[in-house]
Image (tube, rainbow, N blue to C red):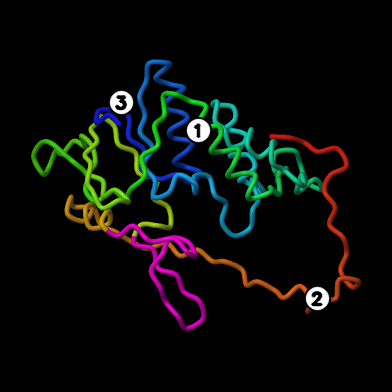
Amino acid sequence: MKSNYQVIVVGGGHAGIEAAWAAANTLGAESSVALVTLEAQKIGVMSCNPAIGGLAKGQLVREIDAMGGMMGLVADATGIQFKLLNTSKGAAVHGPRCQSDKHAYARVAQRFIKSRPEIEVVEGSVEAILTEGEQSNLVATGVRIGLNDGGELELHAPSVILTTGTFMHGIMHRGQDTTEGGRVGEAATNKISDALRSLGFELGRLKTGTPPRLDIHSIDWDALPVQDGDEVPMPF
């Protein structure tokens, strides 16, 4: 593993893999991109409702695709139901949505990342952002990573992209219980929050909401209408 890159991307979720993919596309065949994530096998993992697109979000996926991104390609490869929403209204508000096989989505996303020799995956947690310059004019020059085996590593690059999502100082509420974590069974990344605060950033909190799970045997399926996908699927 080398220590100098052109771009360092922190986070292996949707935003992180798009950032790494875009950097490799933009910088060309000789580019070097480090993708830092807690676990390589969790790259591209879908949380909660495994859907791509929907109202407004579907247009965003199309825009990502127009710019050479990978989300639309992975969604098309792993979709189990495609539906164009809002068809009773004008074309400007039609929203393409794909329900994906969440396990297949992660596998295909990881295959995409592995197909690019310009992208190197580094497993670990960012503990500090390396900077140069005065406090009023700091420039990011890299990151210090706590490796999963207990060691440390410094990576250097003129560009550092943070896509930390729900893992940065993540707290999960389940009923009256509160635990730290970015996703069930996965640890939060706390030190990067402290690093950003020390650099003068003000941190807030964004609440997400996971719908409750229902016992499949408690539902009267015969009383519910079937929601079929479109007879002719419209890919992204």
Q: Quadrant of residue 179?
A: bottom left
What amino acid is at disc 2? Ile
The answer to whether residue 208 is above or below residue 154 is below
Q: Position of residue 215 (x, y in %)?
A: 72, 76
Q: Tell whether 99 sits left or right of 57.
A: right
Mark 3 surroundings: few (<14), some (14-19) or many (≥20) residues within 10 A: some
Q: Residue at x 42, y 17 (%)?
A: 28
Kindly indicate the quadrant of the structure image that contains residue 158: top left
Q: Residue furthest front?
A: 149
* Real-space Cα separation, disc 3 to disc 2, in angstroms: 53 Å
Q: Specify the amino acid type for callout 3.
A: Gln
Q: Which residue is label 2 attached to? A: 219
| Residue 208 percent location from the top left of the image | 50, 63
Secondary structure state at the residue bearing disc 3:
loop
Q: Residue furthest bottom?
A: 176
Predominant SS of the magenta segment: loop
Say left or right for 129 vs 76: left
- In contact (CB < 8 Å): disc 3 and disc 2: no
**Residue highlighted by disc 3:** 6
Do the residues under discs 2 and 1 have CB atoms within 8 angstroms?
no
For badge 1, the amino acid type reads Ile
Task: Categorize mark 2 by other alpha carbons within 10 Å: few (<14), some (14-19), many (20+).
Answer: few
| Residue at point 52%, 27% (across, down) | 115
